Amino acid sequence: MYRIGAPELWPPSEPLRSTAGDGGIVPDPDAPTHRPTDAETGAPVPSDGDAASADSGMSSQAISLVFLNLVAVIWGTQHAVIKMVVDDGSGIDAADFSLARFAVAAVVAAVATPDLRGLGEWLGRGNKEDGALPSEEIMSPAATSWRYGSELGAYMFAGYAAQAIGLAYTTAQRSGFLLYLNVKLVPFLAFLTLGRRISLPTWASAAAALVGTTLLGYDGSTGPNIGDLWSIAAAFASAVFILRMETASRNVPDSAALNSACLWTVTVLSLLWTLSVHAASGSPVESVTAAYDGVSRALTLHPWEVIYLGAVSTALANWMQAKGQQGVAAERASVVYAMDPVYGAGFAYLLLGETMGVRGAIGASIIAIAAATNAFLDLGAKEEDVNDDSLEILATSSDREEEGVNDVLAINNNSIESVEKI
């Protein structure tokens, strides 16, 4: 008696046996029913892993977009709050205020400070005998956090310092919309430094932003001033920060550690700025005393403003930005940030009573519409790419399944032929 374990069809039928009487093939009731495994047949069964990964990726991206939109709202509040501090008539210097703000932010994020030995590892990277720099693959997580945190901190310091100086001369509303230029600068910086393609919607949005910014600058209420130039400089620094944040957030999984390293760097740079401002006070001791007095005055006159700007719009918002940009490209994140000046205009009106002229309102509307349109077009393109990838995965799985069935049928036919010969 010969028993054949290969099935006739998929799913497998009962095992077969030959009978001595007629040489026919009939089901063998005594044989165990066996369905060949993928390893036995070589036929892969379609998996839901790719679909699950796609769903997980889309969910992660949705969370990232929620974080980034909250960041835009928080940033929208800070223009008016900073204006309240630097323009209150008390003579608070932008350097003193910035040091107070970032010191608060650094203290809030201090619990996540990376190991200081990592900082020593990063700073001492060039002290090797051969003078070679260590690759990022062999650096410790703490050293990597300090490496990217210090770089981002330099860009953040430049942006916030320029913003604080500019707000002493221009309005909070105009500062917000001029800072929005960072959204348009990011794709072009990505093109220049990373070779990324600039899409047609991005070009159209950039042109609309240029028109809107021009109308905003000549809205009839106030003419262009030095504060506008400082705001544009802040926009450039912010664009570089956003672009480099994409790389940093993907190389440093611990967003809190990256945020803390960044804020400590900004605090140190703010301290150096403050000391340089007060250097004319006399001796180094007198300079330190003058800096201390300036920071103390900022904290005494505007405690809640400084705490809010340090803890919420800096420490919290920076952490949310680092977390959010782990799942979103810099170009797309910059489109989300485009609503910052719209929120800023609203808070400037509520907190400061600032209003725009007709041309300024038209320019602001153009900027907002361009940002929203670009976001929807970008989202549609992303969803189309995902759908195409999903269809390709399904087609590949179907082809593999068909190949597996054919292999099983071939095995079965060969088995039957062997039995007939016997």
Image: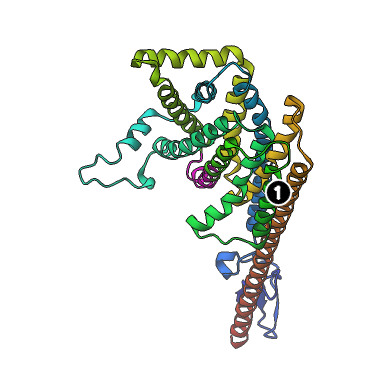
Say which quarter of the image contains residue 300: top right
In the rendering, at what x and y percent does residue 127 appear? 25, 39
Q: Foreground: 411 or 147?
A: 147
Q: Foreground: 327 or 191?
A: 191
What residue range appears in magenta? 240-253
- Residue 252 is a magenta residue: yes
The amino acid beneath tag 1 is Gly
Residue 16 to residue 160: above or below: below
Residue 292 to residue 273: above or below: above
Say which quarter of the image contains residue 47: bottom right
Question: In the picture provided, is 15 more to the left or to the right than 235?
Answer: right
Residue where numbered disc 1 is placed: 212
The residue depicted at 49 percent of the width and 33 percent of the height is 157
Task: Please identify the quadrant where the N terminus is shown.
Answer: bottom right
Q: Foreground: 111 or 334?
A: 334
Name of the residue lying farthest toward the bottom:
421
Task: Please identify the quadrant where the C terminus is shown.
Answer: bottom right
| Residue 59 is at least partly visible in this image | no
Q: Foreground: 363 or 169?
A: 169
In the rendering, at what x and y percent does residue 356 appear? 76, 37
In the rendering, at what x and y percent does residue 341 appear? 69, 39
The residue depicted at 48 percent of the width and 41 percent of the height is 252
Question: In the picture provided, is 241 more to the left or to the right than 373?
Answer: left
Residue 131 to residue 281: above or below: below
Say which quarter of the image contains residue 104: top right
